[in-house]
Image (spheres, rainbow, N blue to C red):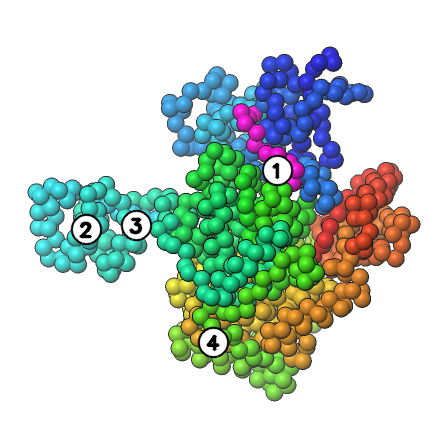
Amino acid sequence: MKGNDLYVDVLLPLALPGAFTYHVPPTQQDRVVTGKRVIVQFGRRKYYSAIIYRVHRDQPTGYRTKPVQTVLDDQPVINAFQLKLWEWLSDYYMCSMGDVYKAAMPSGLKLESETRVVYRPSFQPEQVSLTEKEALLLEVVKERQVTGLKDLTEKTGRKDVLPIVHALMQKGALSVEERLRDAYKPRKASFVSLNFSPQDEEALNRVFEKLKNAPRQVELVMQMIRMSGNNGQDLMIKKQQLLRQVSVSSSVLKSLIDKGILLEQEQEVSRLQQGEGEGEAAKGLTDAQQQAFQSVQQQFREKGVVLLHGVTSSGKTELYIHLIREQLEKGYQVLYLLPEIALTSQIIHRLKAVFGDQVGVYHSRFPDSERVEIYNQLLDASNVNRYQVILGVRSSVFLPFSRLGLVIVDEEHENTYKQFDPAPRYHARDVAIVLASMHRAGTLLGTATPSIESYYNARRGKYGLVELFTRYLDIQLPEILIGDVLEARRRKKMSSHFTPLLLEHMQKALENHEQVILFQNRRGFAPYMECADCSWIPQCKHCDVSLTYHRKSKNLVCHYCGYAQRIPDTCPSCGSHNIITRGFGTEKVEDEIQIYFPDARIRRMDLDSTRARHAYEKIIHAFEDQEIDILVGTQMVTKGLDFDHVSVVGVLNADNMLNFPDFRAFERGYQLMAQVSGRAGRKKKRGEVIIQTSQASHPIIKQVIDNDYEEMYRSQLQERKEFMYPPYYKMIRVLMKHKKTDVLNDAARSLVDRLKQVFGYRVLGPQDPIVGRIQNYYLKHVILKIEKERSLARSKQIILKKADDLKKDPAFRSLQIHFDVDPL
């Protein structure tokens, strides 16, 4: 290579450290810019779309560089803010930039040899100009419908299939296969229109002549004419909307369609209706809300992060709306983070009503093509009228913001903001704070039950603190009652898993046409099954965990790897037929509560019942419209949902939360019980919460009853300090995996010995996690506790060096080591 040749360091979507250098052919040199995607060959046969990380003329030594195959983009798809954030993520969370790239980009923007592409039947080739090689490749895909890029390379004999596929995607001929496509169908709605022109008197007379003996049908036609106005027969009206306005049965509408007077057709509708809203002003703030709003503004002048500690139903969302409006008027963007996809359903309608089409939603239940569309909308900095507000879950922090003015992290205490697997194992709240600081924007953390770490930072003055302890319209906090399970069992008054107190209050609520929420933080029908004669319990083949019984599918399912099997007729250990269920999950609650309230309409909201793309919002809307009497759910029902008619909330098993072997168990138990309690009696009357427990005198139960967050915080803080836990110490968990237990044990002991040479007593382990084997890999954990005063960056360097030295041992080459910084 000549000294004046051009080189690029690129990031590949692989868990490999560092960037990789390629030389740029002369024909491509004027197109390479940091942030653009290029197609490169990696290894002998694999091709990837890589991100240009650096452009330079420093010729590598010791190896021959491969050429860049092609440059995919006219403009960069990654901006400077994103690259800076990626660098921070890689450094802080001890992972590769490739790990961050994989997590940050929508699938449609990271083509690779393993990518599967799909022919789009709606594509019309006569309307698009195709090159010869594009037409040839399209024929191959069309023939197979779905195929991998590796197969395409072999079938066509071409090495440059990635840029051709990219060009065909741009022209609408192909799309990337999405993992969730089969499970999540697009929303469709039935529309009706007039099959005649209302301005045509002759046609109008024929219609009324045909309907002279059908007054209800005439009424519906007249409503259609009124609604169509000047649009006449061109206006399409939603079928359900029309039926609501005229109050006629669907059979009346069907008769008009059968007679050819109305036309019906099904159309795909967007999850977020365009043209909604921005006709509604933000609601006025109460005196308490106005005071909090002004206090937030004042705190932002001094602090980059403000914690808004507001009780449930205090109107935090209205406060957010006023803060968002303030930023939009200044020309800035806003990121509004939520912990659960379920919450977006309610919040989006409130935001759209005020901000209209400036609001975009970004989460994994959207098809990849829609996520790419939102990504590209934000990438176009000149487009100031679209998606100025992004409502999304944790992955939204990776979007290409260019003028970010405010980040709102709602329910900041929630553990669902933490990415557990794969790397980067980031916490979206902490990443949001860093992202906002890079943009010189403010971060607002909102919650009724702050995480101990955030509250500690606020009390020490690192964050601003604003408190809002007045509920909207001065509604009282719910009355919390204890359903003593031990006492009810002693008196033999338990009805299945329900205390008499809970059933009594549910009965009263249903008689008053009010709604009930039952919270059980375990999905499935029963946590496990057991042989009553020999105590045999069915276990997963690939993980060291019992299988959960799901009654609907009649399967035993592993919640870690997805393995499933049918329920055995006889015990494989002793041959007994006496196999029974133990414990209870949401499925069993749904099933058994129907026995006690046979006329009640009962639904379940958990991971199993909400896999479909719109399942969340269907359940939530049905509950809002009082089409459901009793909603049974996991922690999804605890997070910020607002229902007008809920008067009773039942926490079915508080003991499970409090007895979990984790130093955050008491904090988490308090947060879950306090949050789910906030769903009761939010608007019209004081609600009631029944907490079922066998530990009625437990301090956390008392603190929940008294709504005493401060006491919970003080007691937990004292324990954390004594036992060296956050917020006084930083924690790093080293996760080790191998298919052989003896190799794993040797490696874990060796790593601990190496680490103890430097960190001494700060190293805990090796220890077995609660589930010691997942997907045929045995697991070991090593915990490091590092003082806040000690250099965390230097500590990480030492840990990485010790781990790298260990893996150089030939005996441990197949060992997998991962790092979890600030584990939950």
Q: Quadrant of the N terminus?
A: top right
| Near-viewer residue (208 or 302) | 302
Calculate the distance from the C-alpha at mark 1 to the C-alpha at mark 3.
43 Å
Which residue of the protein is positioned furthest toward the top in this rendering? 2
The image shows residue 798, relative to residue 682, as above or below, that is above
Residue furthest right in the image: 757
Question: Which residue bears the numbered disc 2?
Answer: 226
Local secondary structure at mark 2: helix
- Residue 45 shows in the view: no
Label 4 is placed on what type of residue?
Arg
Check disc 3 and give the amino acid type: Lys
Q: Residue at x 17, y 56 (%)?
A: 219
Q: Element under label 3? A: strand
Residue type pointed to by label 2: Arg
- Label of residue 686 in the image: 4
Closer to viewer: mark 1 or mark 4: 1
Q: Nearer the viewer, mark 2 or mark 3?
A: 2
